[in-house]
Amino acid sequence: MQVDGLARALLNNDVQQAFMAMPGAPVRLHIFEWGGIGTQRDLVGWIDITDTAVLQNISNTLLNTARRPREVQTAIGGAMIYGAKGLNRQSECWRRTLDLTGDGKSNQGPRPRDVHDLPEMTDITINALVIGSATQGKDTIADLTAYFGAEVLRGPDAFVETALGFEAFQDAMERKLLKELLTFAIGSLRHPVQ
């Protein structure tokens, strides 16, 4: 559901316009799936978002990706390390942001807070999109939002977006992408010093 929600969010007109806001400095995108330790797999390798056709192709790739069985292990720290290593191969990027989505707390591998100070994490912002329910036992949307805020977020202006259930994931992803992309585009405009 997360992969399909992301695929559809990339087709949102406002999201596409935000991706294209700085044609001289295209956004680079890499999408990977993660679960337990060692289960990360790249769904879309690094690609410059140069036009809406690229976003359409990415969306099609995601919608046609074979699904793996749901895992009971959640290795958020491992996903953070995997994503950071990928970002570190993009040294020419002005801003490096890792987005993690999840519906549970880490229960395998290093704790997210224990990887924040690793050398791979230097100059990386980590944002999150949390999926939960109002009455999900001990891990309500409020509990998960607080957990991700305390354990996962990293860097200036890092934030948590929330989806109240998987059916709200696409809308939440659209909000998150717009916040990231529009903030970057506005923040990158510079006026000459007089």
Image (cartoon, rainbow, N blue to C red):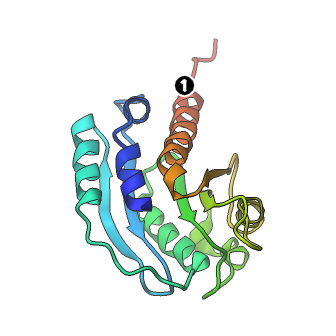
Residue at 61% over, 73% down: 119
In the displayed structure image, the side of residue 176 where residue 89 appears, left or right:
left
Q: Amino acid at mark 1?
A: Leu
Quadrant showing the C terminus? top right
- Name the element at disc 1: loop
Res. 51 in view? no
In the displayed structure image, the side of residue 97 where residue 62 appears, left or right:
left
Residue at 39% over, 67% down: 32
Report the front residue among 14 and 109: 14
Quadrant showing the N terminus? bottom left
In this rendering, the count of numbered labels is 1
Residue at 49% over, 68% down: 83
Is 106 drawn above or below residue 144 in the view shown? below
Q: Residue 156 placed where, x, y %?
A: 70, 49
In the displayed structure image, the side of residue 126 where residue 170 appears, left or right:
left
Place residue 132 in its image quadrant.
bottom right
Q: Residue 15 placed where, x, y %?
A: 43, 35
Q: Residue 16 placed where, x, y %?
A: 37, 34
Residue at 22% over, 61% down: 64
Most extreme residue toward the front is 135
Residue hosting label 1:
189
Report the front residue among 64 and 123: 64
In the displayed structure image, the side of residue 115 where residue 56 appears, left or right:
left
Res. 47 in view? yes
Report the front residue among 188 and 105: 105
